[in-house]
Image (tube, helix red, strand yellow):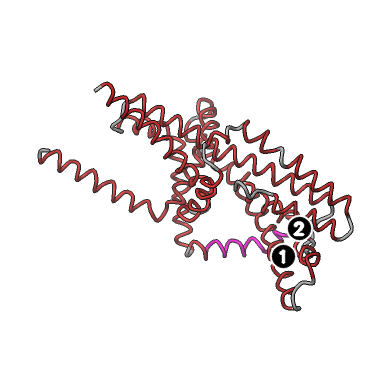
Amino acid sequence: MDSERAFGLFLLATATVLTLLLFRPFVTVVLSAILIAYLLGPLYRRLTPRIGERPAAVGLIFAAIVLVVIPFVVLLGVALSGLQSLLQQLRDGATAGGFDGVSELLESTFATDFDVQESVLEFVQGGHLGEIFRTVIDVVGGVSELFISLTILLFLSYYLLKNGDDLVAWMIDQLPLPKAVTTELIDRADELLFAVFVGNTATAVADGVLVGLGLLVTGFSDVIFWTFLAVFLALIPLVGTTVIWIPAAVYLVLIGNTILGVLLFLYGVFIVGAVDNVIRPYFGATEVGLSPPLYIFGVFSGISLFGFVGIYFGPFVLAFSKILFDTLGGVVRRDETTG
């Protein structure tokens, strides 16, 4: 290897390392921006010919904040209030000398004093949004870091929407692989990200909402909290929402509402359980190609490494690594055969 080529590789390696170091503190923000641009991309490409690139990108990001982020924060705050009520019930039970049997434990868990009829308006008027905002600031590390993270998220989402296709085309040109192989990998990554995010999210939301409706109809309180928890648990294979509706059905039987308990159990088995067989294949989520233990490992290791978005990017990294080995291994074997 001549000195010019060696120096060029050294510069590339140095630039790569420095770039990764710059991105490392904001990896969660960067991945969130990639996810936002990916999800808004189809709408952006439809709106661009009509209203232009800049208005389309700005309008979609603003609409996402207004229609998705703000309602999500409000509902999350209501759910957190339910969690606080639940923890207080459990703490009071422990202080009083423990729970007398399974029935009392289940009652304390499912029949909390948090009123499901508490409206979102009351929650906002109560000043709880300020508490959530202060909590977010404490978690992020201060107002300045929160401002920096939000600024990076908004600008990066904007430019990825506008120039994301150009970035992908540049990557295809720069990677030292046959163009057909690189294009195939990009297409597989697109399908995989759609399956991991859209497929699993749609399934989890459907699962969670159905569980919440079942609990509401059978007379449980704190339904918003349990719905949020059910959505999160539905993202995890083998765990799912059974850890909510099975104990709830048992509780109904223990307090004498046998018919409601049996109906809730059957509802969970045949209605909630059927969602995976209907919605998940429709969105291609079964094409992720990971066994349940690997998927669970991807979820929790992804959360540890990437933050909340690791729920999606953890399994994505594992599944795409498998695709890389399969695809590039096939290229190497073909080269060896032809050589």
Q: Residues within 10 Å of mark 2 (few under 14, many from 20)?
A: many
Magenta highlight range: 123-137
Q: Residue at x 51, y 29 (%)?
A: 45
- 255 sits left or right of 36 in the view: right
Q: Residue at x 37, y 30 (%)?
A: 169
Instruction: Tell me, for residue 63, which label it has, or none.
Output: none
Vertical order, 137 against 235 (above or below): below
Picture coordinates of residue 113, whole percent (x, y): 79, 65
Q: Residue at x 79, y 51 (%)?
A: 215
Q: Dot 2: what SS?
A: loop
Number of numbered callouts drawn: 2
- 280 sits left or right of 34 in the view: right
Magenta run includes residue 188? no
Can you tell which quarter of the image residue 323 is in?
A: top left
Q: Residue at x 52, y 36 (%)?
A: 289
- 151 sits left or right of 243 in the view: left
Hey, which residue is sitting farthest top in the picture?
A: 338
Sequence-wise, which precedes: disc 2 or disc 1? 1
- Identity, as a three-letter code, of the amino acid under mark 2: Asp
Q: CA distance from mark 2 to mark 1?
A: 9 Å
Picture coordinates of residue 152, whole percent (x, y): 44, 50
Q: Dot 1: what SS?
A: helix
Can you tell which quarter of the image residue 253 is in?
A: bottom right
Magenta run includes residue 129? yes
Picture coordinates of residue 259, whole percent (x, y): 89, 50
* Secondary structure, magenta segment, majority class: helix
Q: Residues within 10 Å of mark 1 (few under 14, many from 20)?
A: many
Do labels 2 and 1 touch, CB within 8 Å? yes
Residue wearing tag 1? 86
Residue wearing tag 2? 222
